[in-house]
Amino acid sequence: MSATLGSMMKTLNPQLKINIYERLDLVAAESSDAWNNAGTGHSAFCELNYTPQRPDGTIEFNKAVSINEQFEISKQFWAYMVNKGKLPEPKSFINNVPHMSFVWGNKNVEYLKKRYNVLSKQLLFKGMQYSENFDTLSKWMPLVMTGRNRKQKVAATYMAIGTDVNFGSLTRGLVASLKKEKGVKVALNHEVRNLKRLEDGTWLVTVRDNKTEKERNIKAKFVFIGAGGGALRLLQKSKIPEGRGFGGFPVSGEWMVCNNQDIIATHITKVYGKAGVGAPPMSVPHLDTRIINGRKALLFGPYAGFSSKFLKQGSYLDLTRSITLKNIWPMMSAGADNIPLTKYLISQVSQSNVARLNALKEYFPEAKASDWKLETAGQRVQIIKKDKKGGGVLQFGTEVVSAKDGSLAALLGASPGASTSVDIMITVLKKCFPKEMATPEWQSKMKEMIPSYQKKLSNDKALANAIRKANSTSLGLKYFTVD
């Protein structure tokens, strides 16, 4: 998020001076790292949690269309940066990996068919395929179907233009390009410790050099807090009224990682299933082909868990330190209203190796424990915010919180996160720089970076075809032309 915003702002105003602070010794080693997130280019092709079934049995699809459009916006910006020579070879961060949804059982098959019937009519989802035929599914995902009972009621959708994204590599590419720009400084092993608004409206940012343990203060006209799970504490330290009442609930994860190269070579898709009852969206099970540093990998999971850390390389005191008089009631209220989530996390934390293997076998019937190892995934912090009744609600998604004067913005939340980063950063720019965004100069540059800016691809066939063709050509991806 920070790398995206910095890159966009430097394009909009090359004269800007930008300081980027990273507490670790490597950029994007937390939430954006390839092993710490799903790596799915979230476009709602396969993620069933974006298309819930309404009480009347119909399918809600507006969120899926919105997320797909937002991912198209991200691809436009990445293509622009590639064409400008500001990102490396596209295959280093984005590759085609088909997206599939897979379900079993009469009720789930009925749901998936309804979902397909709705989505396949939407412009951006044209080309999606559906099948209940065992042999067809065996061609799409042989690993999933081998050893499965042919009498089992199964169904799947298939989208050939799905993508796998290494967001760690992408982020490091953006930051490497920024470092070459005049007026940009990137400081690793530096941690922002405090934020204080001065009388003139600027911010005094206290930064600690973690190697020397020395602190220094920097004045800034604008601050963006894109610290993943660490953003909540910094937002609280800013003391802006708009940040009051926000809390966070951490959810950790683990992957089963395949170490058998023959099995890895057999599977070439991302197969997403349905989440368990009470499961957070990030815990949707998937058997997932990844391209990490030029090599194929195969992961299954994530298995959800609980840790009081807000960052993978954080402190076990993070949750306790985030509790204040202003958010304790919303947090308690949200906890009382989310008992199923608590039960789910407890069951996940207490899972045995046999239980984890059995979960994997639902997607890979012939899985053997010796071919897989358990690895820790990333840490996410779900938003807790005040509701209209004064209590709290646990919110899955992302939210931009900004000061009224636009001098500070923070990003809270998780999924779909990085996939929609460009659209989210456009929101930051509109909130924090409304006058500049309205000028002809910035408008022109926004349209140069994002050709569909202020237009909707989802209801414009000619524009959607043109944008997808241009993006795919620049990024080396497959695409469909909609007739």
Image (tube, rainbow, N blue to C red):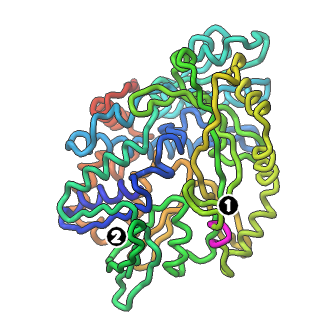
Magenta-drawn segment: 318-322
Q: Name the side, left or right, on which 252 lies relative to 418.
A: right
Q: Is residue 384 left or right of residue 333?
A: left
Q: Quadrant of the C terminus?
A: top left
- What residue sits right under mark 2 in the picture? 434
x and y percent of residue 40 in the render? 51, 37
**Quadrant of image for the N terminus:** bottom left
Query: What residue does disc 1 label?
Result: 308
Q: Is residue 252 magenta?
A: no
At numbered mark 2, what does the secondary structure look like: helix, strand or loop?
Answer: helix
Q: Residue at x 37, y 44 (%)?
A: 170
Instruction: Give residue 150's position: percent from left, percent from top.
Output: 75, 10
Q: Residues within 10 Å of mark 2 (few under 14, many from 20)?
A: few
On screen, residue 452 above or below 98: below
- Looking at the rendered structure, the kind of residue marked 1 is Ser
Query: Percent position (x, y) of residue 431?
Result: 41, 68
Q: Is residue 320 within the magenta segment?
A: yes
Q: Nearer the viewer, residue 325 or 453?
A: 325
Q: From what the image shows, is residue 355 above or below residue 279?
A: above
Q: Nearer the viewer, residue 96 or 252?
A: 252
One can see residue 42 in this view = no
Query: Of the numbered discs in the image, which one, if any, rests on residue 297?
Result: none
Percent x, y of residue 404: 45, 78
